[in-house]
Image (tube, helix red, strand yellow):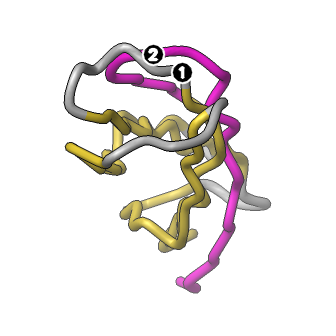
Amino acid sequence: MALSFLTPSVTIPVGTGRRSIQQSVSFPRNVLRAGVALNGFKLDYDADDHHINIVEVDTDLVSISGATVTFRVECHYADKNFDDKYGGYVTALVIAETA
């Protein structure tokens, strides 16, 4: 058994509100166990001059199927009235114990 690491980047498309984006990565061998952690992120308003009200970024393991690990990134970036567009990226760290 060996540990393998991947750091996929998930694009957060420009828009408003809370986002939930699912993505999968494949390892060279079947995955026995896996975990997902936040490696980094950038969220930025589409326009200038905003006072931040909420910054939220989360990663969750969704499923393991053979050599594929599916995970979800959730994020929210808003000012006091929650109506301004934002976009960016989230980089996850997927750690897998492989056969």
Q: Residues within 10 Å of mark 1 (few under 14, many from 20)?
A: some
Tag 2 secondary structure:
loop
Res. 25 mark: none
Residue type of the residue flagged with mark 1:
Lys
Q: Position of residue 74 (x, y in %)?
A: 36, 36
Q: Residue at x 40, y 61 (%)?
A: 36
Q: Determine which residue is flagged by label 2.
A: 16
Q: Nearer the viewer, residue 9 or 54?
A: 54
**What residue lies at 59% left-to-right and 46% top-to-bottom?**
44
- Give 50 or 29, whichever is nearer the viewer: 50
Q: Quadrant of residue 62?
A: top left
Q: Quick check: 8 left or right of 37?
A: right
38 left or right of 42 in image: left
Q: Main secondary structure of the magenta part?
A: strand
User: Residue 85, which numbered label?
Assistant: 1
Q: Residue furthest front?
A: 49
**Residue drawn at x 46%, y 20% as measured from the top left:** 84
Quadrant holding the C terminus: bottom right
